[in-house]
Image (tube, rainbow, N blue to C red):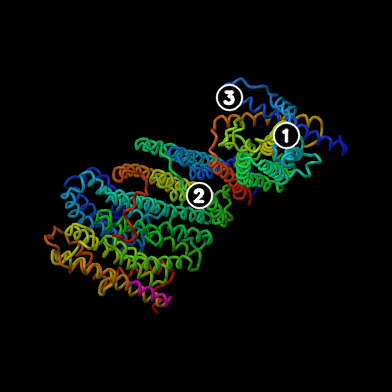
């Protein structure tokens, strides 16, 4: 037990790395999917141990060689990532076996898929845990590289097109982030004597007040464009719906649920440094502007979609915009809301994508027009889709309602007139989602539509969690969120509440 | 800082950096695929030499490793891979029609001026010898993006993608004498993996849409039109 | 040894005469180099002189409708070329003509000559004349900005547009590796090639009606007139050569007016021009002539080079 506690970080991180090679060899065999689940489960278990360690003893806040840094902000994201990773791995077993049975995928492709799944998890976890902002960039780029072949897994012209767009747009975008990182390093070098440590987050955060404001503001623009591309901020979001709709559905689930979060995580880390140096709201205002634009544009685009996965990916863009906006408002309360929203959105959205995966198998198509009467054909999938959509649209008592409510209250305090577009956007998105979902769930099922073998356990777990988070927040989570929010917004929640 | 007061080694860095910028421009104007790859290899070579020279005058031994890495990766390995793929795809004689080469070059000049203004405040804070070239590095990044935008050929876009990495390496080199070693290695690894993946892509693209023209990829729309 | 004012002017005149007299020789040298590169046995270096002598002996034939402009143009063209020859520092910088040795003056001399050639070409009313004139104007409209941009790059470095002062400034600072000069030199060379009607813009040795530019303009000229224009053309080539040689490799030029310095100056410029001639011959041998409507691309590339020179000066060399 003690060993697990002290080495939780290493196990969480290196297990997927090892898994990448293991699955590269055995991933195509019958047990590949099970191995994938097993590795993900172990990784999740050790991430829980890591979180437990942080909660009890605060180990390892900073790993011995300063390679890794765990604080309240990233610890819950690590657990979240491992959890969603595990659930999606469970889902992907049934989903992928169906695809193989249909003859859409070969053994080799399955090997690639499983290996890259673990590779992607490794890149995500590395990005979250690393203390070095340069490595954070490397991990983000590696995450793109790991997923790009998965987007084109089916080798259809559409999937190739989607993957190419994803590759080029994200590659070019994230290059801007590297330029921003170089500028950050440049600014850090002037004040931090030990150059090898000038990109370490804990060192930078300690010196953020001394960093040159002009350089940092230029750097932030590049970082915003770079990581913003990955977050899916308008107008750099083009790759996102394509990549989501053309890849295998488990991929869509982890892209929406995890990759976008991690990109936003990177952006927020940078924002803290910039805020510390600038002492004004430049970074916050930029994020608010882009966030709001993204939110509104995506809400409008929701209406015009005919592909169910595209529709939900626009919903993801919309929510990422909302989070970016919330981090941009940068009061402790809005940051709290954003952190909570990150968690509930990940859980809900990946649950939705899992359900959608089964739904597309039932209907044999991703076209919304062709999906009808899910609740009659297979009640579990129909209900899952309905409840998931209700949750993501912000129905009480789900967690998304809670976080959106918090966000709107926080906005009301700071920028009362911005509440209007927020509410408007939420309404538009709500209408758009239900316009499409209602006939899919309740419509008349086409003749001969048969249920499929669906594993709804992950959906149940995740939606249940979202419901719980909407009803009450456990103490340790509030504690983390609150401390993270205080730290990220350079203020204290309690002061704001009083 | 007047160039006449610097040593010849330092002047040579400026000359090399100007030549790197020039290679970026000639990539913009080059319509033959094979020549484009050759120019890209030249850019990598020039960058490697520049890195070695900077290592020499600033006395930063770790930059020799970066220089070597650049020479191996950007000047030899990646161009070699690209050439081989072009041969296998039988695109040696491929000539891309450039819609408006003059306008593109002028837009490139505009980008150089733009990056000059962006980099002015950064330059004024730096006291490295190479501070004047920071804006050039940004210009190389932006010119490579322009290359990607103006090209319709997948291989050319990949060359642009790699040229962006060149610009970023150059930026790190001249503004801070390189990033920490671990980051440089990570970036080099990413670039290498990207190069391999691009190679895989060319073949997938060829087999699925029978062309490497990205304009042929027009099935996905922001809003479904059907 | 201080020479009197008269002696200085005498030297300046001598320098101009030297340039004018050597101009056909440079052309002969380039032709000889080219012939050797093509594995021909070269004509004598003095062949251009013989050609000129032949032209001057022949009868002048003037078209019926031609006006005085047609007759006056050869003299105007040669006159402006001789003036520009006087302006360019050939062997020494410290001469009285240095005061007007300004790049802008030089460019306007060229423009003046071109203006009159174009008018005269259209004067006879033949199709070729008009065609050549319009082509020439199109090319020069593109070439002139590139040339000015290239020389301004140097001027910005030396803080003057005066050629002699620029050369003296460069000599004072010794060898400095300036990125801007590389681009400016390349840009200026490309402009020089276009302006003197050589490959790849124009082919001086053919009269192919579809492609010729300069030759089309002077198609109606004969005898003495043709000789004058040919000679002016050779001087132009020489002036460009001297400009490039002395601006970018200024070493050797005489800054004082002692006999030794002047002697070295003469030898230096002859050496530099010989090298330049070889370079030009190689360049022309390796390239094919461009189609006429590709010429704007060529010249915009020259302009781009000059612009890059200017930008690298601003970005890299100051501040």
Are tags 2 and 3 found on a single chain? no
What residue is disc 3 on? Answer: C37
Are tags 3 and 1 found on a single chain? yes
Task: State which chain disc 1 sits on.
Answer: C
Are tags 1 and 2 found on a single chain? no
What residue is disc 2 on? Answer: B104
State yes or no: discs 2 and 3 in contact (Cβ < 8 Å): no
Q: Residues within 10 Å of mark 1 (few under 14, many from 20)?
A: many
Q: CA distance from mark 3 to mark 1?
A: 32 Å
- In the displayed structure image, the side of residue C212 where residue A405 appears, left or right: left
When the figure is inspected, residue A409 is found, relative to residue B74, above or below; the finding is: below
Quarter of the image with the C terminus of chain A is bottom left
The residues colored magenta run A415-426
Q: Residues within 10 Å of mark 2 (few under 14, many from 20)?
A: some
What residue is disc 1 on? Answer: C225
Tag count in the figure?
Answer: 3
The picture quadrant where one finds residue C227 is: top right
| Viewer-proximal residue among C150 and B143 | C150
Name the residue furthest bottom: A498
State yes or no: discs 1 and 2 in contact (Cβ < 8 Å): no
Q: Is residue A114 magenta?
A: no
Q: Position of residue A412 (x, y in %)?
A: 40, 77
């Amino acid at each position: 037990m003690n060993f697990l506690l002290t080495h939780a970080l290493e196990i969480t991180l290196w297990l997927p790395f090892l898994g990448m090679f293991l699955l590269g060899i055995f991933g195509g065999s019958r047990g590949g999917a099970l191995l994938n689940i097993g590795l993900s489960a172990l990784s999740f278990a050790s991430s829980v141990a890591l979180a437990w360690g942080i909660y009890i003893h605060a180990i390892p806040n900073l790993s011995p060689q300063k390679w890794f840094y765990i604080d309240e902000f990233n610890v819950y994201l690590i657990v979240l990532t491992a959890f969603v990773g595990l659930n999606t791995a469970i889902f992907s077993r049934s989903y992928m076996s169906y695809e193989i049975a249909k003859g859409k995928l070969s053994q080799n492709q399955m090997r690639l898929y499983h290996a890259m799944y673990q590779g992607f998890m490794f890149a995500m976890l590395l990005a979250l845990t690393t203390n070095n902002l340069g490595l954070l960039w490397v991990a983000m780029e590696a995450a793109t590289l790991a997923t790009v072949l998965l987007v084109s897994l089916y080798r259809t012209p559409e999937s190739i097109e989607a993957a190419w767009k994803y590759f080029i747009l994200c590659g070019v975008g994230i290059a801007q982030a590297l330029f921003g990182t170089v500028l950050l390093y440049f600014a850090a070098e002037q004040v931090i004597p030990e150059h090898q440590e000038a990109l370490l987050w804990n060192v930078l955060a300690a010196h953020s007040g001394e960093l040159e404001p002009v350089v940092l503001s230029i750097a932030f623009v590049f970082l915003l464009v770079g990581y913003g591309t990955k977050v899916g901020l308008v107008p750099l979001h083009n790759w996102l719906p394509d990549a989501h709709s053309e890849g295998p559905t488990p991929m869509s689930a982890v892209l929406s649920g995890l990759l976008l979060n991690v990109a936003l995580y990177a952006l927020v880390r940078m924002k803290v440094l910039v805020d510390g140096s600038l002492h004004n709201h430049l970074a916050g205002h930029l994020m608010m502007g882009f966030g709001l634009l993204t939110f509104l544009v995506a809400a409008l685009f929701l209406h015009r979609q005919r592909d169910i996965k595209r529709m939900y990916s626009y919903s993801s863009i919309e929510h990422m915009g909302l989070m970016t906006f919330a981090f941009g408002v940068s009061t402790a309360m809005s940051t709290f809301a954003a952190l909570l929203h990150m968690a509930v959105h990940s859980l809900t959205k990946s649950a939705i994508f899992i359900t959608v995966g089964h739904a597309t198998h039932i209907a044999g198509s991703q076209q919304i027009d062709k999906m009808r009467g899910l609740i009659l054909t297979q009640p579990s999938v129909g209900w899952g889709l309905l409840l998931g959509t209700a949750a993501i649209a912000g129905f009480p008592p789900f967690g998304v309602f809670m976080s959106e409510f918090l966000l709107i209250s926080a906005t009301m305090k700071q920028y009362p007139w911005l509440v209007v577009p927020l509410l408007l956007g939420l309404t538009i998105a709500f209408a758009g989602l239900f316009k499409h979902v209602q006939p899919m769930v309740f419509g008349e099922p086409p003749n001969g539509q048969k249920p499929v073998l669906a594993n709804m356990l992950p959906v149940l777990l995740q939606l249940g969690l979202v419901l719980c988070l909407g009803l009450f927040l456990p103490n340790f989570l509030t504690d983390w969120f609150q401390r993270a929010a205080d730290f990220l917004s350079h203020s204290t929640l309690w002061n704001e509440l009083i | 800082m007047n160039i006449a007061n610097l040593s010849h080694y330092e002047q040579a860095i400026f000359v090399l950096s100007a030549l790197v910028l020039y290679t970026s421009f000639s990539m913009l104007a080059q319509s033959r695929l094979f020549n484009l790859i050759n120019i890209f290899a030249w850019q990598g070579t020039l960058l490697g030499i520049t890195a070695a020279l900077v290592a020499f005058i600033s006395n930063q031994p770790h930059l020799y490793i970066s220089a070597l890495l650049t020479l191996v990766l950007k000047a030899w390995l990646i161009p070699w891979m690209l050439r081989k793929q072009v041969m296998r795809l039988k695109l040696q004689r491929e000539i891309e029609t450039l819609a408006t080469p003059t306008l593109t070059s002028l837009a490139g000049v505009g980008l150089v001026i733009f990056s000059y203004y962006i980099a002015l405040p950064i330059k004024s804070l730096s006291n490295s010898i190479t501070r004047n070239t920071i804006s050039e590095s940004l210009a190389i990044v932006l010119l490579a993006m322009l290359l990607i935008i103006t090209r319709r050929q997948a291989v050319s876009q990949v060359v642009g993608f790699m040229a962006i990495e060149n610009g970023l390496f150059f930026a790190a080199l001249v503004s801070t004498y390189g990033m920490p070693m671990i980051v440089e290695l990570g970036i080099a690894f990413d670039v290498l993996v990207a190069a391999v993946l691009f190679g895989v892509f060319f073949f997938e693209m060829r087999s699925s849409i029978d062309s490497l023209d990205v304009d042929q990829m027009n099935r996905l729309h922001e809003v479904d039109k059907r | 040894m201080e020479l009197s004012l008269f002696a200085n002017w005498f030297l300046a005149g001598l320098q101009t005469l030297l340039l004018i007299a050597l101009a056909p020789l440079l052309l002969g040298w380039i032709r000889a180099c080219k012939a050797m590169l093509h594995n021909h046995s070269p004509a004598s270096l003095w062949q251009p002189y013989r050609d000129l002598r032949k032209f001057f002996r022949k009868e002048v034939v003037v078209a019926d409708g031609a006006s005085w402009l047609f007759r006056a143009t050869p003299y105007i063209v040669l006159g402006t070329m001789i003036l520009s020859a006087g302006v360019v520092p050939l062997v020494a910088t410290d001469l009285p003509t240095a005061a007007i040795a300004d790049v802008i003056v030089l460019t306007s001399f060229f423009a003046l000559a071109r203006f009159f050639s174009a008018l005269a070409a259209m004067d006879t009313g033949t199709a070729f004349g008009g065609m050549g004139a319009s082509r020439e104007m199109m090319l020069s409209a593109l070439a002139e900005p590139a040339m000015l941009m290239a020389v301004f790059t140097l001027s910005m470095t030396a803080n003057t547009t005066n050629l002699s002062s620029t050369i003296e400034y460069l000599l004072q600072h010794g060898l400095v590796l300036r990125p801007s000069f590389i681009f400016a030199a390349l840009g200026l060379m490309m402009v020089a090639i276009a302006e003197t009607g050589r490959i790849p813009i124009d082919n001086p040795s053919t009269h192919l009606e579809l492609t010729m530019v300069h030759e089309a303009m002077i198609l109606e000229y004969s005898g003495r007139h043709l000789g004058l224009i040919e000679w002016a053309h050779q001087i132009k080539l020489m002036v460009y050569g001297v400009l490039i040689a002395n601006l970018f490799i200024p070493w050797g030029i005489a800054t004082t007016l002692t006999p030794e310095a002047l002697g070295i100056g003469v030898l230096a410029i002859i050496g530099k021009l010989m090298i330049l001639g070889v370079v030009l011959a190689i360049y022309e041998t390796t390239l094919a002539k461009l189609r006429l409507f590709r010429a704007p691309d060529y010249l915009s590339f020259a302009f781009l080079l000059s612009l890059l020179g200017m930008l690298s000066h601003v970005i890299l060399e100051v501040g």
